[in-house]
Image (cartoon, helix red, strand yellow):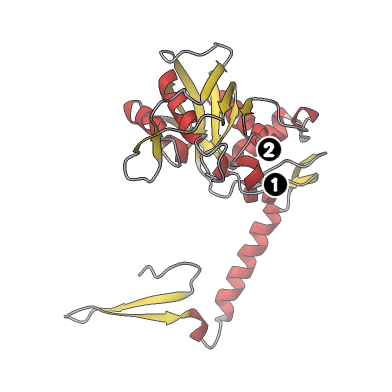
Amino acid sequence: METGCYLHNIGVVAIDGGVPKGELVAYGSFDKIDKSVQAIIDQENERVQSQLNVVLGSTPFLLDGNRAPGVRTQETNLGDFIADAYKWTAEQELGTKADTCIVNGGSIRQSIEAGDISLGNIKTVMPFSNELTIINVTGAQLLEAIESSCQAVGTNEVIGGFPQVSGITFTVDAAIPYEKGPNYPETTIASPAKPGSRVTIADVGGKGFSKDATYSVATNSFVSAGGDTYHAFKEAADAQAPVMFSFDYEAIVGYLVTACDHTVPNTYAEPQGRITILGA
């Protein structure tokens, strides 16, 4: 039975023709380790670690994955790199152009220091193995999603929904308070009462921006399912099922190795100005 995490306790349920009886057995109460089982664990750990230690490329500078200030509050160079990797992978896998990419900052868990980049580094940055998806959204849904995901900008609050992006440029005016609408279903996240009051989208995929247009968005399965602040994307995915492909970390590997020839380009030394924050 489920008893928590990390095997801190083992749950035991005994059913003997009557009312089930349950108990917890603390892991620390076991007086010995089975050597044959430990040998299997050690062998697997060694095998996995040998794969994680493989060096795939390098970066001449820090790729910033800090939370705040960082990927949950502002554009960062690692956010740009990952969003570009998602978008590039979507286009390679599906053979079609993606207008934009949105990556929730909360899915980026660590920086990458200057130097060699191993598979283990990448898996530490992107530990969830979310699937990449392509969804089609209206301009109105895209604006609502960005307005919602930037609601904490200019406050002391930090949320994982803040977008790291590719193929889109927009401005957030933090001097204008976020006006809350009703909470999204089954969440404590307030929808924006007036999408577009703080956020102005300048361009999507080189097409300008219109609320009435339809845009293809590369993202991850957590976001397309409405995670964090992205209920508008769930509505789009419910209306037209997203196309899924690859895992998030695989996109970073492919982009680094193939598109960047194993070395992070100098264009990522600093954030590229895709997101402008005013009045903060």
Task: Give the image quarter of residue 185.
Answer: top left
Local SS, label 1 = loop
Residue 95 visible? The answer is no
Q: Where is residue 237 in the image (x, y as percent from the top left)?
A: 37, 30
Q: What residue type is labelled 1?
A: Ser
Q: Which residue is drawn at 52% across and 39% down?
A: 152
Label drawn at residue 111: 1
Q: Which amino acid does label 2 sit on?
A: Leu
Task: Give the image quarter of residue 265.
Answer: top right
Residue 162 visible? The answer is yes
Residues 72 and 48: in front is 72
Q: Position of residue 17 (x, y in %)?
A: 17, 80
Q: Position of residue 65 (x, y in %)?
A: 67, 44
Q: Where is residue 60 in the image (x, y as percent from the top left)?
A: 83, 39
* 220 left or right, relative to 254: left
Q: In this figure, which residue is indicated by the disc labeled 2?
A: 78
Residues 276 and 207: in front is 276
Q: Which of marks 2 and 1 is nearer the N terminus?
A: 2
Q: Quadrant of the N terminus?
A: bottom left
What residue occupies the far top of the structure in this picture?
207
Q: Spatial distance from mark 2 to mark 1, Cα to Cα?
A: 7 Å
Local SS, label 2 = helix
Residues 53 and 217: in front is 217
Q: Which residue is drawn at 60% across and 46% down?
A: 126
Packing grade of label 1 (10 A; few <14, some 14-19, many >=20) is some
Q: Quadrant of the C terminus?
A: top right
Marks 2 and 1: CB-CB under 8 Å? yes
Residues 30 and 187: in front is 187
